[in-house]
Amino acid sequence: MKKTLFILLFATTIIYSQNIKAVYIINHLKGLGANDDDTNAIKPQTFTFYYSNKKSIYTLVSFQKSSIDTSFIEHDGIKFPTYNEVTVPSVDITYKNIKDNILIKEHTIKNKDFSAKDKLTDYQWTITNETAVVNGFKCIKATTTKEIVPVTAWFCEEIPINDGPLEFWGLPGLIIKIELSVYSTITLDRIKITKEDFPINEPENKSKQLSLNDFNNSIDSHLNSTSIFSSFK
């Protein structure tokens, strides 16, 4: 009995001592055009993801400035161009402390800083029986919503860490892939798992820390007011 208990305790220690250094890629879907000639795709974005001792930090390492996404609509056999300004941030950091239920976000976009500090989002995940292999990992499908947007997550039970990219967390395994409805996908590109702990510190806040809801609203207002199309409104 004592031997069995020791084995269980040793296995538990191995599971919870796993730490991660990984890279995720965000692929944004193209515009509304019917084919590749009708639209300019946003380039993929690369993020690092570090996890240790129930803390994680997800950081943008490449960025693209504003661009114009061109799509076409057709009326009476004639195609008319429509335009959508696409802007991605130069700084994008998400920090999570699962033990203390803390979420911190830092965002710099169009030369303005935004900061948020809030509780972790309590996602109501529905775990399905559907499985798939994603980048070599056997994954299970789970679904939820984020601000009414349907979200699909593919998580791997073989990596027993209840975390993932962006604000997503709370599944019994590392989230390997996120599908944000028709908007974008976030996929694990490569990963290194180690037993060695490393520090994960809170990011320095560059502006007044807002609630997550106010943070998102402030960014939306800033983008609307600085859009190249705002003068036509």
Image (tube, helix red, strand yellow):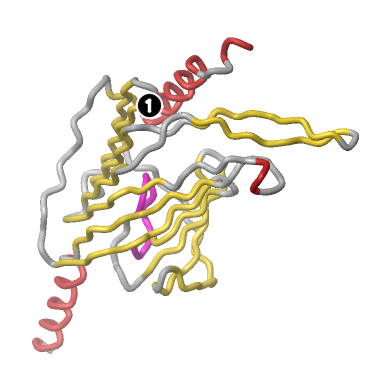
Q: Tell me the quadrant of the picture where the N terminus can be found.
A: bottom left
Residue 174's x, y, as percent?
A: 34, 62
Q: In this view, does 137 lie above or below 73?
A: below
Residue 220's x, y, as percent?
A: 48, 24
Mostly what secondary structure, the magenta segment? Answer: loop
Mark 1 surroundings within 10 Å by alpha-carbon count, few (fewer than 14), some (14 through 19), many (20 or more): some
x 22%, y 27%: residue: 205
Give the magenta-colored segment's residue range: 164-174
Tell me which amino acid carries mark 1. Ile
x 43%, y 28%: residue: 216
**In magenta segment, residue 165:** yes
Q: In this view, does 132 lie above or below 72?
A: below
Quarter of image, res 207:
top left
Residue 62's x, y, as percent?
A: 33, 42
**In magenta segment, residue 41:** no
Residue 40's x, y, as percent?
A: 58, 40
Quarter of image, res 192:
bottom left
Left/right of residue 109 with respect to residue 148 in the rendered view: left
Left/right of residue 128 with respect to residue 106 in the rendered view: right
Q: For mark 1, what is the residue?
A: 109
Numbered circles on residues, count: 1
